[in-house]
Amino acid sequence: MKRNDIVRLMIVWYVLVPVLFFMTACQSNVADSAPATTALPTAVPPTSTPIPPTSTSTPLPLTATPAALPALNPSRRGHFSMAYDEESDRVILFGGLRVADNNWREASLFDGETWAYEVASNQWTEMHPTSGPGPRLATGMTYAAKADRIILFGGVYPGEWGRDETWAYDYNTNTWQQRASGPASHLGCRIAYDAESDRIILFGGYDYSNDTFFNDTWVYDYNSDTWTEMAPSTSPSPRNLFAMAYDAESDRVLVWGQDRPEPDATSMWAYDYNSNTWKEMISNEGPTRNIRLSMAYDVKADRIILQSDADTWAYDYDTNQWMNLAPAQTIGMRSKYDMVYSTAADRIILFGGSKSSSTFNDETWIYNFEANMWTDVTLHP
């Protein structure tokens, strides 16, 4: 072989062999990187970058209470007042004492809240009006149907034991309006609305400054915004913190019990505004406890309903008789509570009060006269 031929073979070897090796390697890499045509991905990768764990919010401690959650019921209390707003179908509650009777001089324990209760939904709502009567207890309260207003009178507050203010509450606008002043220093008086006469009747009370009990009768006319003392010839004995209700069928304001031992403590008294007369209704044996209780008139049953100790009683004005209803479930010892009748629900609604001498509660109970049954409907967190 000639020298020139040998040189040409060496050039081919050093040039073509590396090129062939490079092409073979590229084809191998392309084949390895191509996915198999029969395999599908098991998951679609996220298109956005995940939030790192450190950016999540810190959870509240287990002991923390969310501030935004409203209270389910008014707080524990006694010596408050309730009335049923028939047009709005709401029970209105105001004021009271939060702890016990031995704290009458502790201003921070006096309450000035306004609450509304709807029977159908079993829901309490704190109303938060922009202004109102201010903290107090032992007020008189009733509903004036023609005016469509809750009327509140009197009450006490440490250092102001003889308040004579009259206030009117409009549920539709959630406003309190102060009205004309009434009789002074009538702590624990009671008021009731006489629907036939469109007048509010006030009886009794106590003057703390000179330890005097009253047995005077006053009438408030919402339309003229005036109080008038009636001065009937005969009256029940002086008293306060008793039970009072209007019997619509007989057109009489009824008074029973008191906060002091008197001969007529177990008699029902009936007031007729049209004749300005009180009549003592001496009846059969009735409730044994008659101090710091409340009663309500059941329109459908035409009976006065009263809770005394652990007993539920009904009073019939027409027969002048008490009956111990003895429901299967009792609500136990109860005083310093309040109760009203809802015409829409045909039920008695009772709230709060004390089961002992020193402890109030926040329970809501409903009584059905036809079934003779109490039901605890208290909402618990």
Image (spheres, grey):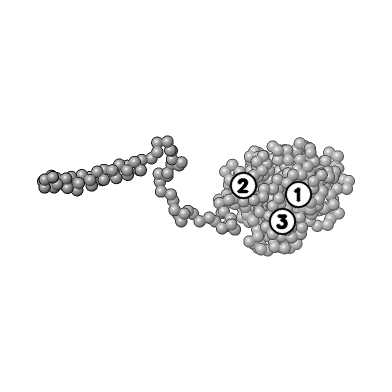
Sequence order check: which comes first, mark 2 or mark 3?
A: 2
Q: Residue at 74%, 60% (x, y): give it.
A: 358
Please name the amino acid that badge 1 sits on: Ser
Disc 3 is placed on an element classified as loop
Residue 135 falls left or right of residue 231 = left
Q: Which residue is mark 1?
A: 294
Residue placed most toward the observer, 182 or 359:
359
Q: Residues within 10 Å of mark 1 (few under 14, many from 20)?
A: many
The amino acid at mark 3 is Phe
135 versus 91 height, above or below: below
Nearest the eye: 162 or 381: 381
Residue marked by disc 3: 360
Q: Residue furthest front?
A: 1
Q: Are marks 3 and 1 in contact (CB under 8 Å)?
A: no
Number of marks in the image?
A: 3
Residue that appears at 42% across and 44% down: 46
Q: Which mark is residue 125?
A: 2
The amino acid on which the numbered mark 2 sits, given as a three-letter code, is: Thr
The secondary structure type at the circle numbered 2 is: strand
